Image: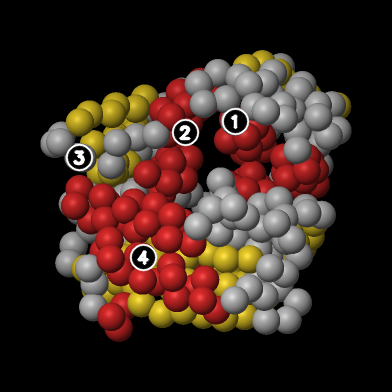
Amino acid sequence: MLTIDGSFGEGGGQILRTTLGLSLITQTPVRITSIRKGRARPGLLRQHLTAVQAAAQVGRAEVTGAALGSQELEFRPTAIAPGEHAFRVGSAGSTTLVLQTVLPALLRAGAPSTLTLEGGTHNPMAPPFDFLDLAYLPLVRRMGPDVRATLVSPGFYPAGGGRVRVTVTPAPALAPLELLSRGEIVSQRAVATVSNLPGSVATREIDAAAAVLGWAPACFAPRVLSGGHGPGNVLTIVVESERVTEVFTGFGVKGVRAESVARKAAEEARDYLEAGVPVGEHLADQLLLPIALAGRGAIRTVRPSSHTTTHLRLLGELLGIRASVEQISERAWHVEIGR
């Protein structure tokens, strides 16, 4: 049994999810220790536990230590079971992070799958649905598998209650991916969405984002939802280029001014545009695993985060891949993966 220290590097839930995903793919039993040890609330939280349960269902696995707060887990997969699966986080915990755990194995499974995930769809510290749909999955499709996601109903932090449907048509193997330039910008837009909150919040965010980005007024729009979505607020900034689409997000949090939320997201988008690279910080982290499964690939991105460097180290340990990270200009880095 392979043992992985869950506290190394960035020390977060990414280590758990990637380890489980690769355990499924390689059918290797694993023990994960010190799970999220350095966090304010260490061990498995609700969304992490749901990810474990999802991996166990897809992998027909035997699991010990699958409990809230657990810092050690043993996971023994026996097969990959494509088909119909439903996973409920039971809180505003991220549906996309649960998907992240099981999707890699289903990309190369022997038959298609349909997943229904219930929980949060727009959460701080997790890829929101818009990122999944517009930025990440189009690149996965470019590598061979056909993966489509539908937002049945949104679930904003902190209430959750959203639903996402995902269909996966696998491919025998993943094609290598190279993203070294983004090409010309096709469109750019910023949408401030509020659910069961005053529309003025969205207007203030739009004004603050516009002041940072300087785009034409037609690029900005407020969106007001009402009904059973729960209170929530998200600013979504989309930059569509010839070869890639990037998504930057700011989440409204109680006690944080709308202007601050908007400025932070807009500054991230502005820095990405000024760097001249195709891949932003969060997309870089998400692309590492499928590229590693393809056997080789390369991206150009902004300064790699601690998530990215931890992920590269983990992929090297679990898959034996080699990776190089080289700064090629003041704001651009070249990341290459090969065996």
Does the CB distance between marks 3 and 1 fall below 8 Å? no
Task: Work out whether 254 lies above or below 29.
Answer: below
Q: Which residue is mark 2?
A: 307
Task: Work out whether 316 lies above or below 163.
Answer: above
Q: Residues within 10 Å of mark 2 (few under 14, many from 20)?
A: many
The alpha-carbon separation of the residues under discs 2 and 3 comes to 18 Å
Q: Earlier in the sequence, mark 2 or mark 1?
A: 1
Amino acid type of the residue that numbered disc 2 sits on in the rendered structure: His
Residue 41 location (% of width, % of height): 72, 30
Amino acid type of the residue that numbered disc 1 sits on in the rendered structure: Gly
Q: Which residue is mark 4?
A: 208
In the rendered image, is residue 175 in sight?
Answer: no
Q: Is residue 334 left or right of residue 54?
A: left
Q: Residue at x 73, y 61 (%)?
A: 160
Q: Residues within 10 Å of mark 3 (few under 14, many from 20)?
A: some
The alpha-carbon separation of the residues under discs 4 and 3 comes to 25 Å
Amino acid type of the residue that numbered disc 3 sits on in the rendered structure: Arg
Quarter holding residue 121: bottom right
Quadrant including the N terminus: top right
- Mark linked to residue 331: 3
Q: Is residue 210 left or right of residue 42?
A: left
Does the CB distance between marks 2 and 4 fall below 8 Å? no
Amino acid type of the residue that numbered disc 4 sits on in the rendered structure: Ala
Q: Earlier in the sequence, mark 2 or mark 4?
A: 4
Q: Residue at x 27, y 74 (%)?
A: 187
Does the CB distance between marks 2 and 1 fall below 8 Å? yes
